Image: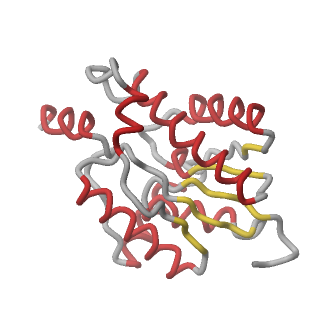
């Protein structure tokens, strides 16, 4: 840890997305990653993504925290009734809130006053929706939410480059069973 920079808890949705986000945050913050994604299905995919988040952290030199166990039931309860929503719809908003709330709680638990997420690096995610949720949770939990749109200035392109250089696994669907099914229908 660098005493000259404040700590930030970075919610990580996947290893590849964490690369360019870390690169953008590192000059300003001491980054601690938090891989919280009970939405990822199946369990084998969850562990593969968790391992790649840890690999990104080791390669770039930042700590990544991964929950000890996979608990998809908490996420399934959060999105119940929204199974047929399209990608980017209300189910995704609930998913963002579920994972960002876990990050806000983790930041508070660890005494870290700022949190953010890799979600905004994706060209498939609405940064405005993520920002609204993050700001609301920041107010609710008494921590700050850094609302950087990491896809700007070719952030996503850079994450693709870095993940290729590091040999990171890049998934082909967002993560949940519903996004997997929708992806397969589109083919």
Percent x, y for residue 124?
A: 41, 38
Q: Is 32 placed above or below 143 here?
A: below
Residue positioned 59% across, 74% down in the render: 63
Which quadrant, please, contains the N terminus?
bottom right
Q: Which sits in the foreground, 144 or 151?
A: 144
Residue positioned 55% across, 49% down in the render: 151
Q: Quadrant of residue 23?
A: bottom right
Percent x, y for residue 135?
A: 71, 33
Q: Is residue 25 left or right of residue 79?
A: right
Which quadrant, please, contains the C terminus?
top left
Q: Quadrant of residue 2?
A: bottom right
Q: Name the colouring of the figure.
A: secondary structure
Q: Which sits in the foreground, 136 or 71?
A: 71
Q: Is residue 94 left or right of residue 86?
A: right
Q: Is 116 placed above or below 57 here?
A: above
Percent x, y for residue 128?
A: 60, 30
Q: Is 132 placed above or below 118 here?
A: above
Residue positioned 30% across, 65% down in the render: 48
């Amino acid at each position: 840890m660098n005493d000259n920079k404040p700590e930030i808890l970075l919610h990580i949705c996947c290893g590849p997305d964490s690369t360019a986000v870390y690169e953008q945050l590192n000059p300003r913050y001491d980054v601690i990653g938090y891989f919280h994604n009970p939405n990822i299905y199946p369990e084998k995919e969850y562990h593969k993504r968790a391992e790649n988040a840890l690999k990104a952290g080791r390669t770039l030199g930042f700590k990544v925290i991964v929950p000890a166990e996979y608990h998809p039931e908490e996420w399934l309860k959060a999105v119940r009734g929204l199974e047929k929503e399209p990608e980017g719809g209300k189910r995704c908003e609930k998913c963002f809130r579920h994972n960002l709330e876990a990050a806000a709680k983790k930041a508070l638990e660890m005494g870290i006053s700022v949190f953010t997420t890799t979600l905004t690096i994706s060209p498939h995610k609405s940064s405005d929706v993520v920002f609204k949720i993050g700001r609301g949770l920041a107010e609710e939990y008494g921590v700050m939410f850094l609302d950087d749109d990491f896809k700007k200035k070719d952030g996503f392109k850079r994450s693709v480059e870095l993940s290729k250089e590091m040999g990171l696994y890049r998934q082909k669907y967002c993560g949940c069973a519903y996004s997997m099914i929708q992806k397969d229908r589109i083919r």
